[in-house]
Amino acid sequence: MNGSGGTEAAPDGDMELYDLRVVVDRIEGRSVCGMSVGDDFVLERSAHLRIPDGKHFCVYALAAVLPFLAAKQRDLASGDWLAQDSLFCCPDPEERLVMRVERTGRRRMNSADLT
């Protein structure tokens, strides 16, 4: 505890999270949203989402994978299905866009710096 009654964050971090890359793995239908295989975004530092300059990522595809990203950033039990699965599908049945979530690195962070 510090003198003000709060907790002091460890200088080298007190938790670890994975940085993620979400990439379009394949499109089994027709690309309605204008995305292509290889299009991607990166999620770093818990909540920093980056899309390459001049590119876009379909908001509906993003909405489909978004609920799983916080879990994919953390260590999961070996028997957890999410620890083994990394493919997620856009909800558009004509497009059948499949995204792959990749862990790109592990980062130490201070939990006090996050909300």
Image: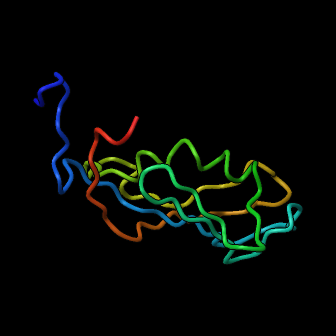
Query: Residue sitting at 61 percent across and 65 percent down?
Result: 41
Where residue 10 sits in the image (x, y, percent)? 16, 47
Quarter of the rendering containing residue 99: bottom right
Image side of residue 43 versus residue 93, left or right: left
Q: Is residue 32 above or below residue 3?
A: below
Between residues 11 and 102, which one lies in front from this camera angle? 11
Image side of residue 77 versus residue 45, left or right: left
Between residues 20 and 36, which one lies in front from this camera angle? 20
The count of marks equals: 0
Between residues 22 and 29, which one lies in front from this camera angle? 22
Q: Is residue 95 above or below residue 26?
A: above
Which quadrant: the C terminus?
Answer: top left
Quarter of the rendering containing residue 36: bottom right
State the residue lying farthest toward the top: 5
State the residue lying farthest toward the bottom: 38
Query: Residue sitting at 20 percent across and 42 percent down?
Result: 9
Query: Residue sitting at 36 percent across and 55 percent down?
Result: 83
Which quadrant: the N terminus?
Answer: top left
Where residue 46 sits in the image (x, y, percent)? 43, 51
Tell me which colouring the rendered structure shows.
rainbow
Q: Is residue 89 above or below residue 80?
A: below
Where residue 88 sits in the image (x, y, percent)? 59, 56
